[in-house]
Image (cartoon, rainbow, N blue to C red):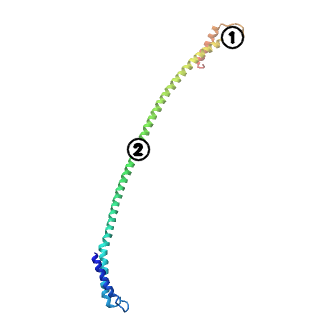
Amino acid sequence: MSKFCSVLGLLIVLFTVRAYGAEAGMPQLDTEFWAAQIFWLIIVFSILYLIIWKIFLPKIIYSIESRKSRIVNDLNEAQKLKENAEKKLKDYNKIIELAKNEAKKVAEENKKKLDKDIESKKKILNEQIEKEILAVEKEIKNLKKNSILDIKKIAADISSEITNKIIDTEINKSSASAIVETVTNKKIEKGLL
């Protein structure tokens, strides 16, 4: 390549000296120099063509091809990343759906458990209330029986004292209690006491 450049430089110098020999006006318009001008035109453009074709064009083609292959590789990688992202999104959605279902199951189980606990506590409470009611009813019956007996005693004592004060005669307590007993039994039968 260096030999070719040195020969080319020598030819340029030789023909340049001859081209400067035009003394009358513009050498481009002088027909005597047209052959030299056409020769140099062909040489210069041939050299430019060869330089571009052999040196710059392969570099440009290589650069374009490498960019093209890099773009294709980047597009392929982007497609793989997109597919991977879509797969991860599907997996993520599945995980979320499973978590929602699991949360629903846990909530339902807890609700059932709470309902059972509430029902059992309600049952126990109802049983306790029932026992308390029975105990209170029993106590009321006992109190009623005792109070009726006490009322009968008090009534017999009061009636004998009242009679004693009104009539000034002492009445037998047993007869007063018998009268009070009959009156209270009639009231009990009628449901007044």
Which amino acid, by three-letter code, is at mark 2?
Ala
x%, y% of residue 155? 65, 14
Say how many tags the image has. 2
Is residue 131 at least partly visible in the picture? yes
Q: In this view, does 84 lie above or below 48?
A: above
- Look at 46% across and 32% down and name the residue there: 117
State the mark number for residue 161.
1
Q: Which of 175 and 23 is in front in this view?
A: 23
Q: Which of marks 1 and 2 is nearer the N terminus?
A: 2
- What quarter of the picture does the C terminus occupy? top right
Q: Nearer the viewer, residue 14 or 131?
A: 14
According to the picture, the residue beneath numbered tag 2 turns out to be: 99
Q: Around disc 1, counting alpha carbons within 10 Å, would you say few (fewer than 14), some (14 to 19), or many (20 or more)?
A: some
Q: Is residue 53 left or right of residue 107?
A: left
Quarter of the image holding residue 151? top right
Which amino acid, by three-letter code, is at mark 1?
Glu
